[in-house]
Amino acid sequence: MLTTAHFNHTIDERLDAMRQTGDAPADSLVALLFEDNPSESLSLLYRWAESDQTELPLMLYPEHPFWIHYQLLPDWVNPRLLDVGRQFFHQYADEIMLLLGFLSLPYCYAAADGAKVLFRSQRIIQDTRRRLAETAQFVLAMHHEDAFDIFKPAMPRAMRMMITVRLMHAAVRYHIRRLGKWNYSLLGVPVNQEDMAGTNMAFSFIILKGLRKIGYALAHQQAHAYLHLWNLVGHFIGVQEQLLPADERTAALLDQAIVRRQFKASPEGRALTQALIATMEENATNLPLMPFKGWVPAYMRFLLGDFVANLLAIPHSTLSPSIFHLYKLRGQLRSLSSPNTATNFGALLQRLYGKLTYRLPERM
């Protein structure tokens, strides 16, 4: 795993190499899916991902090296830490689910080159609300008690979701490569290892920073366990082990390096952010958390800080930052659901959207 010892004069060389690295096993499998019999292959993939059947369909090439990744847990996994990480999530589920939209996603959009890939799909612009719901469903699934139980007769739904997301990333690389209009030397491989590592930390380390900013004093073991759990998520969606931070200090150093290297203003990042703000304002007008217009971008700027907020063109607010220090999100969010909010949030998503499923893009 990545440790503080790796942060020396060669860190930029390491990350430069990771910027030109995709996910070879997933890329190879996706090429087979699209070039053999895509209509039948993708249909079988989706049926498998959404069902409880044990066997992989033949068209999914069960002997392909891609599947080896899902036969064993990595040797660094600590089951006790996974349990503590799950407990931590459920303790702060209200706050974490809101921080995903206010902090994690816009934080990702500040990485300009990575934002170009997201913008190309257009789906996150045209159907932002559903994309947010899919992200929320994914995060909820990662904290289910059987999420990483690869030894169950039927693969857990969370594992199937991670596999589908990994193949979805590979499909993006496949289509962009075939279009032949991507500047690889300047932008790196689409959905490359550096971008994937940064995104994974946006859902782990950056969430920890957000919780502390809104006033929570987190126990070291809890924070470490949450990072550990999301390192395992990163492992199963294809992030190389050398980019999974062993502890919070290493995560902070990796975050600083990625911000220095990748965060800059871009029209794509700003367009993604404006679509996110508009969607959140549209769907939150009746919540006591957001009692007046302008609260969403104001709170987003508070969490992100002026540097990132300026890159994303999030408007300045006349609200004093002290307002956001006066309370924590938990008491303001009870109108969303009753206690045991992770379970109820999942039920709410089911009622609003039905069965949310990931699909591999068939074109870009």
Image (cartoon, rainbow, N blue to C red):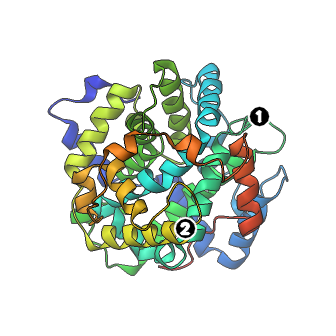
Crowdedness near tag 1: few (<14), some (14–19) or many (≥20) residues, C-alpha within 10 Å: few
| Residue at the (63%, 74%) spot, across then down | 36
State which quadrant residue 214 falls in.
top left
Q: Look at label 2 and name its amino acid.
A: Thr
Residue 12 appearing in the image: yes
Residue 76 percent location from the top left of the image: 53, 24
Q: Residue furthest left?
A: 9
Q: Which SS class for mark 2?
A: loop
Residue 73 appearing in the image: no
* Up/down of 78 relative to 148, above or below: above
Q: Look at label 1 and name its amino acid.
A: Phe
Question: Are the residues tagged 1 and 2 within 8 Å (C-beta)?
Answer: no
Find disc 1 in the rendering and name its residue.
Answer: 151
Q: Which mark is residue 285?
A: 2
As measured in the structure, the alpha-carbon distance from the residue carrying label 1 to the one carrying label 2 is 45 Å
User: With 228 as the anchor, is 1 left or right in this view?
Assistant: left
Residue 187 percent location from the top left of the image: 26, 64
